[in-house]
């Protein structure tokens, strides 16, 4: 009788991908909350092919997205404190995963919030966002 070869455990792989992506997002949240937009952007692949969709705008390219964040959030008061919640991660293949969740900024005068869908790709430096669609529940 031939010995059975062990098959990879899909649940274990799902858990590993989920934890790796959660780590990227936790690092993004920590960077944002210390006022480090460059550190926050480390969660995105440094490529001209990344896409960011928000409201009626679509931006392409890592530098374009970085410039947008720096223009819109140019002070600690505007940045506030970022929280991600209700994070759901679904591996799509060995190299791609989808993350859905909620975001909220807590600032002195308001608490803008909404949802996001992120497409992650496994890169040479780990999991990175290549597509970000973020919606806002506030004007």
Image (cartoon, rainbow, N blue to C red):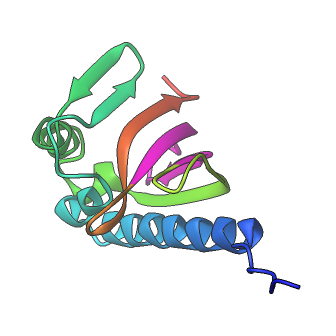
Is 69 situated above or below 58?
below
Residue at left 32%, top 32%?
52
Residue at left 22%, top 58%?
37
Assign the magenta stretch its main secondary structure.
strand
Q: In this view, does 91 lie to the left or right of 75?
A: right
Give x and y (percent) for residue 73: 24, 46
* Residue 86 visible in rendering: yes
Q: Is residue 20 left or right of residue 47?
A: right
Residue nearest the observer in this picture, 42 or 122: 122
Residue nearest the observer in this picture, 119 or 7: 7
Task: Please say whether residue 105 is one of the residues in the magenta stretch.
Answer: yes
Q: Which residue lies furthest to the right in this view?
A: 1
Task: Please say whether residue 56 is one of the residues in the magenta stretch.
Answer: no
Residue at left 61%, top 65%?
18
Give x and y (percent) for residue 47: 16, 44
Residue at left 39%, top 72%?
27
Give x and y (percent) for residue 13: 64, 70
Which corner quadrant of the image does residue 14 belong to?
A: bottom right
Quarter occupied by the N terminus:
bottom right
Number of numbered labels in the structure image = 0
Give x and y (percent) for residue 46: 17, 51
Residue nearest the observer in this picture, 2 or 59: 2
* Residue 113 visible in rendering: no
Q: Which residue lies furthest to the front in this view?
A: 1
User: Which stretch is magenta?
Assistant: 97-121
């Amino acid at each position: 009788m031939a010995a059975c070869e062990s098959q990879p455990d899909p649940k274990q792989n799902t858990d590993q991908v989920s934890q790796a992506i959660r780590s990227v997002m936790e690092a993004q949240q920590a960077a944002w909350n210390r006022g480090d937009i460059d550190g926050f952007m480390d969660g995105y692949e440094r490529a001209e092919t990344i896409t960011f969709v928000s409201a009626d705008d679509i931006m392409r390219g890592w530098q374009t997205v970085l410039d947008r964040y720096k223009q819109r959030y140019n002070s600690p008061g505007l940045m506030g404190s970022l929280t991600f919640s209700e994070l759901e991660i679904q591996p799509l293949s060995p190299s791609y995963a989808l993350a859905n969740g909620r975001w909220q900024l807590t600032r002195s005068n308001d608490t803008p919030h909404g949802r996001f869908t992120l497409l992650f790709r496994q890169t040479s430096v780990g999991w990175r966002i290549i597509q970000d669609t973020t919606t806002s529940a506030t004007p």
